[in-house]
Amino acid sequence: MTNFTTKDLEQLKEHGIAPETVEKQLERFRTGFPYLHIEAPASVDNGILIVDDELAEDALECWKDFLNEGGDVLKFVPASGAASRMFKDMFAFVNGSEDTPAAGSPAAQIIDNLDRLAFHKELDETCHRLYGEGYKALREAGRYKDIIGAIILPEGMNYGALPKAVLTFHAYPDGTTRTALEEQLAEGAAYAAGRGGKVRLHFTVSADHMDLFKKKLAETVPAMEERLGVRYDISLSVQKPSTDTIASTPNNEPFRKDDGSLVFRPGGHGALIENLSDIDATVVFIKNIDNVVADSHRGDTVRYKKILGGVLLLVQNEIEDHLKALNEEYEESEDLEEAVLAATDFVEDTLCIRSNKLSMTEPLQERWKELNRLLKRPTRVCGMVRNEGEPGGGPYLAWSTDGTTLAPQILESTQIDLSKPENKSMMSTATHFNPVDLVCYLKNKDGKAYNLREFVDPATGFISEKSLGGRDLRALELPGLWNGAMSDWNTVFVEVPASTFNPVKTVCDLLRPAHQ
């Protein structure tokens, strides 16, 4: 047990963190997180659903009916990250010793393609303000660092410190431009507008950027509502301080600053399960802020978002039908046996779950109990893209940490023991990766929201090595939002085309065709 000082306890109270929680985190530093036992990577032959014409038609019709009948839908967008990583190479050039970027380097690509960046007019105005000349004149004079500095530094456009949401991503023929935030609004209107044209969106933002988000929304929402013929209902939230995690020393003791105070760090995107759990919505789409395209490239994205939503509703309807059959009052045990067998087939064939407790050697009542447990859970349908070299976690069939249940899971490489040749082989032959394209059903058949905290596997976080003030520390990240935080959900993987995945991880990604 850690002997917390009075000052420590005050800090914990300010964060809303119980001492017992910190004790568990420190113990996790000592024990580490167990690797998951993977059975196989999910594939179109084993766990990933292919959308044929018949399924597409059924799903699209189901989604259309859901919206027309006043279906309760919301788009949830994690948007709290700053764009510093997006401009990492630009900072390296500005702070480096060379005045000319190396041929083919990211900085050189940007310098050569300034006219193709949607924010080039703002950049030109900024260069005039800072240096009395536009970027073209500066480029001709070889003042490359001044140009890049005008983009990323505080005295310029400050893009290196702003959240991605408010960066200008796309330019349009009529002379207008849109930020990532505005493109999320436009996309939401295309597939999540309910009866009366109401579009609900929720953005998770950094507390430091809350005022900036509110200002941007106030500036842009009225015009977009008029242009698109919709009404936006937008809410914002911040990551809760209670989801921060304690930092530890290399010896797994609480890391302290020079003044003796404890150090806490954000718990990663898995902390957002709290924000998601606070949302009052039946169907929720989840998509990262930077995965957007311009209007002319949005066709596949909108079509497949509707298909994923429709597949979710079709699966959910089957879940509720089986729950109804399982829980009717039967006069004959044979009728219950029939319902149990039908539900077992659905769980195994559609949800791709194998549970030891559904074995035919188990008593009927035990199988009935397990089916109720498995079906009374949140459901998610996840779009999966074929591997084409993009980074990201992947879809696997993995055993639960207690070894009783095999189910579809989205895993990161940190969760897989790569010292085992068979695991390394499975990773190398995986056919799909996770683009973070989810749609979730968060309420039971009676319309009551699930407590999403109950479906997190706490043994699926990870530990990373960091430093503060030149001293090494260990940081603990909570189970990822679409990884261990949704470990105990029902999951269906659906193949979606690569054209639906267009993230902007670096500024050079804005030069790709989908962003032009």
Image: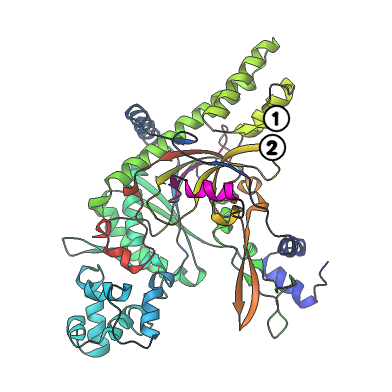
Q: Which residue is rendered at x = 56% and y = 32% of the image? A: 445
Q: Which residue is rendered at x = 53% and y = 48% of the image? A: 425
Residue 430 magenta: yes
147 or 93: which is nearer to us? Answer: 93
- In the image, taking residue 334 as reference, residue 284 lies left or right, namely left
SS for callout 2: loop
Image quadrant containing the N terminus: bottom right
Label 2 sits on what residue type?
Thr
230 or 324: which is nearer to us? Answer: 324
Say which mark, if any, is on residue 441: none
SS for callout 1: helix
Residue 73 in the image, given as x and y percentages of width and height:
44, 43
Q: Are marks 2 and 1 in contact (CB under 8 Å)?
A: yes
Q: Is residue 514 above or below residue 61?
A: below
Q: Is residue 396 visible?
A: yes
- Residue 244: image quadrant is bottom right
Which residues are drawn in magenta? 420-446
Q: Is residue 70 above or below residue 88?
A: above
150 or 386: which is nearer to us? Answer: 386
Label 1 sits on what residue type?
Lys
Residue 316 in the image, given as x and y percentages of width and height:
50, 32
Q: Residues within 10 Å of mark 2 (few under 14, many from 20)?
A: few
Say which mark, if any, is on residue 404: 2
Q: Is residue 30 above or below residue 108?
A: above
Say which mark, if any, is on residue 357: 1
Residue 340 magenta: no
